[in-house]
Image (tube, rainbow, N blue to C red):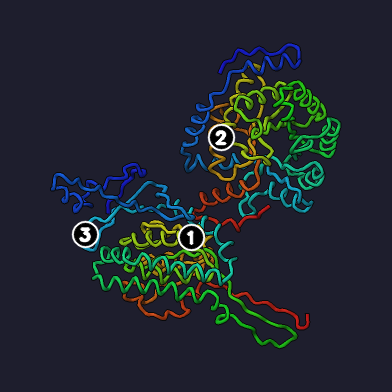
Amino acid sequence: MPHTATVPEAITDHALRAYLHGLPGVDEVGARARAQDLATRSIKTTAKAAAIDLAISMVDLTTLEGADTPGKVRSLCVKAALPDPADRTVPKVGAVCVYPDMVAVAVEALRGTGIGVASVATAFPAGRAPMEVKLADTRRAVADGAAEIDMVIDRGAFLAGRYLKVYEEIAAVKEACGDAHLKVILETGELVTYDNVRRASHLAMRAGADFIKTSTGKVSPAATLPVTLIMLEAVRDHHAATGRRIGVKPAGGIRTTKDAIRNLVLVNETAGPEWLTPDLFRIGASSLLNDLLMQRTRLSTGTYPGPDHYTQD
Amino acid sequence: MAERRDGGKRKNEGAADGGATENRTTATKADVPARIAVRKTYKLYLGGAFPRSESGRSHPVTSADGAHLANASLASRKDARDAVVAARKAFGGWSGRTAYNRGQILYRIAEVLEGRHAQFADQLVAALGVSRAEADRYVSAAVDRWVHYAGWTDKFAQVIGGSNPVSGPYYNHSTPEPTGVVVVFAPQGAPLLGLTSVLAPVIATGNTAVVVSSESAPLASIDLAEVLATSDVPGGVVNVLTGKAGEIGPHLASHADVDALDLTGAGESAVDFERAAAATLTRVLRPGPEADGGEDAWLDTDPGTSRLTPFLETKTVWHPVGM
């Protein structure tokens, strides 16, 4: 979708507003219809098997609970490296996503597996903390070995129209990340409109995000198909304008293989097949992995496995 | 048997099937327009709701003398999968209820079924070609069967379990617990009393059930599902699939999340199902002598505990004396 918004030369509140509000509005009915239409694609047999393996390799296996213990994080890491102990052909997951204080535990547990640790940071999930705290949060996670940082934007500032504050926070956190990849969580469930989702996506990409992520998983609705569609359109347009490919990560509410495959169809049809790689598309989930494994077993053996044949964490 | 893939869109196709002749013939008196027949769409019963088959298929159900009665859903493999998921989800809540509460709910089923006595009797007359008096007897027996098992819910544990004398300073108790998700192949020729006789003992002890109803006479099972849905039976405790046991049975028998099979109505497939069930250590109840006997075979007023015990696991606890 070509748009007429001009990229701001100087980053000021005024210039950002002019740019973001110059983006074309989202056709809400059209976005829903498109997402719904693509969700009816039938993916079967060998294509389904390939999609399941691809989806497993894209899972950011996540535990973000107040009750997380080092033991739970370690068992999650074991599962990340070997999702189905009964079948070693199952690929390993994309990353393990934990709270900052669990990064060291996860890094230790994943040593030698080639799986990176993603850490939420910047006062996840609300993001309501002073800037110094957010940066300290980020630096500590990176110092402990996190390869990816999932930051939350300041939705309050965004909704109040203070785009420069959001922009500067993202830029500052990006700097604090060093070599770590930065995923920017828009928390689309709190952004109210699809227009805001599009604006926040472009704002985050301009500010230096490597990935844009839908949600924290703590707010409902989380990753709905229309929202993911709009964000995929944003990364596609950003690539057309700048040549830089930004990743997308829907998170929250994706629990079944069917949901995951619908997301992959959306990626292929919207951003393009170049995005069908764990480097550019991730799925933030916890219970999804077991459903993918059950469907994989069903395809390879022909019988339905039971959920109690898989570890819960 | 003709199959139809219509996705449920042609709801009133029965109008051309001759299903409502008596309504149309009354239209001969020109001044009184005939009332348009309100035909029932027989759907599945999954997780407390009545959805059409995921496949969109249905099949015509005929009476004993060949007249069209209704179109019933023809359940598919994926409907069976969804039914097991629903039954598994409901298991924790149902097995966690007090035995007394389960008894109240089973008695409630009997109450609601009694109120629909005439409807079920009509259904059996049409489906089996029996006399009205016989049909009444079957419905009454089915109501009584629910009452019978309602009484057992808080008594079987005392009869089957107990404290064991052991040579040591321990109390030793054995208590029966429900097996889990039970797939019930309902008897083919006994659409109400037979179905009740195999289903009631399964849920009385706290199991949840996936019922594959009689292939030729499935309508009573969906009417019974309506009784269950209005009797405080939580959604998912009983799930009813109408269709072909031979088609969906293999997927249920080999399903690793199914804990037990009642093969009463499985017919010639029973051996194959038992073999498939062995791979995942699924409990199996083989068809008994009453399996092919029609409703009459189920009239014994005291079925005892023989259908309660196959779907129970015994838990034994050793507890030190003096603590």
* Of marks 2 and 1, the one in the foreground: 2
Q: CA distance from mark 2 to mark 1?
A: 34 Å
Which residue was labeled with disc 1?
B254
Q: Chain of mark 3?
A: B
C-alpha separation, residue under disc 3 versus residue under disc 2: 49 Å
Q: Residue at x 38, y 71 (%)?
A: B142
**A87, A193: nearer the viewer:** A193
- Picture quadrant of residue B174: bottom right
Residue B192: image location, x then y, percent: 36, 67
| Residue furthest to the front | B31
Residue A306 drawn above or below residue A98:
below
- In the rendered view, tell whether residue B248 sits above or below residue B13: below
Residue highlighted by disc 3? B66
Instruction: Please state the horizontal and vertical placement of residue A259, each as a whole percent of the image.
Output: 55, 41
Tell me which label, 3 or 1, sits earlier in the chain: 3
Quadrant (top left, top right, bottom left, bottom right) of the N terminus of chain A: top right
Where residue B166 sits in the image (x, y, percent)? 68, 86
Q: Residue at x 52, y 55 (%)?
A: B85
Q: In the image, what residue type sits under mark 2? A: Leu
Q: Which residue is mark 2?
A: A225
> In the rendered image, is residue B276 in sight?
no
Question: What's the residue at 39%, 80% (across, down)?
Answer: B301
